[in-house]
Image (cartoon, rainbow, N blue to C red):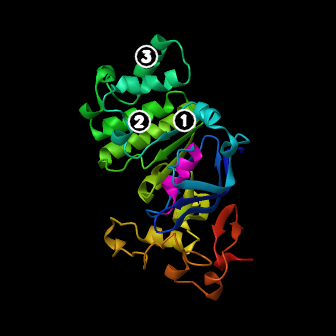
Amino acid sequence: MKPVLKIRNLRVYYRTKRGIVKALDNVSFDVYRGEILGVVGESGCGKSTLGLTIMRLLPPNAKIISGQILFNGVDLLKLSNEEMRKLRGSKISMIFQDPMTSFNPLMKIGDHVLEVFKYHEFNDLEKAKEIAVKILQKMGLESGRFYDYPHQLSGGQRQRVMIATAIAMKPEVIIADEPTTALDVITQAQILKILRELRDEIGSSIILITHNLGVIAQIADRVVVMYAGKVVEVGNVDEIFSDPKHPYTQGLIRAVPKLSPEGGQLQPIPGSVPDLINPPSGCRFHPRCPFASEICSKEEPPAVSLNGRLVYCHLYKR
């Protein structure tokens, strides 16, 4: 299957008062057409920075040091601001973490969706309104909500509007950054169902960014596991959960609460996430890894292919 998005050797650093934060360091992976790709890892591992970099919406103190983001063969990092603006919303869109901070409180819900059509020069506004109402209804919202303001909606309803805005132009790639955060489990299940149906209906590729392994297990086809700004494992979701290879992936899965009586106590990963201003040498996970050896602190692990799965670990070095 041909990738719709190829990320190659991507490095993104933040300039702060304390020093340079190496948020993404040599990140590479593919996104295939029509798949749901989960990106998972602890807070601070670079997941949200990855999404913002693809959209070219990084804050002023961020700098893309090197790498490529190839969308259908076109490097997004080489496009002008105007060329990138035309792609946002139409070809690549993003569902942000907190819809309440993304919406203009003075604009009605329907106007937020219509703005996407106006931005991309869809001149038939009556037709655009008709489409917008249908999209909101598809999200489970009554047509009357078109005229409500963001504060009049619940968190789950605002998230639905955010999704409606993101899919209005039927983009090829949708980046969903923690789309179920702070939602109750019923609303979370509804949002995941909507995302899965969207993938099946319009054929978009979805990059699902989350720290919730339960969400990944429910909806993703493949998984990218990140740690401290680096990719440590990439593979099929069933393989990742049934037979995790990287020690960090193993630790993440052991730390998931189990509801069965034989589940036992939680097994947290010892230690803490490293400071990305001064990250550990070699493998960044080695200070917390139960299998670390001398080479782990000296050399970055290579990418090793295990029956199609990529693992960045010296344990599998050939």
Q: Residue furthest bottom?
A: 294
For the residue pair 309 and 128, the one nearer the viewer reads as: 128
Q: Nearer the viewer, mark 3 or mark 1?
A: 3
Residue 31, compared with residue 258, is above or below; it is above
Q: Identify residue for label 1.
A: 200
| Secondary-structure class at tag 1 | helix
Q: Residue at x 48, y 34 (%)?
A: 166
For the residue pair 257 and 100, the one nearer the viewer reads as: 100
Q: Residue at x 54, y 63 (%)?
A: 226
- The residue stretch that appears in magenta: 45-55
Residue 266, compared with residue 219, is above or below; it is below
Q: CA distance from mark 3 to mark 2?
A: 16 Å
| Secondary-structure class at tag 3 | helix
Residue 24, compared with residue 148, is above or below; it is below
Image quadrant containing the N terminus: top right
The disc at residue 159 is none
Q: Nearer the viewer, mark 1 or mark 2?
A: 2
- Residue type indicated by callout 3: Lys
Is mark 3 in CB contact (under 8 Å) with mark 1? no
For residue 296, what is the image quadrant? bottom right
Characterize the local packing of mark 2: few (<14), some (14-19) or many (20 or more) Cα atoms within 10 angstroms. Answer: many
Image location (x, y in percent) of residue 192: 42, 43
Image quadrant containing the C terminus: bottom right
Q: Identify residue for label 3.
A: 129
- Residue type indicated by callout 1: Asp
Q: Is 8 left, or right, of 251 in this rendering?
A: right
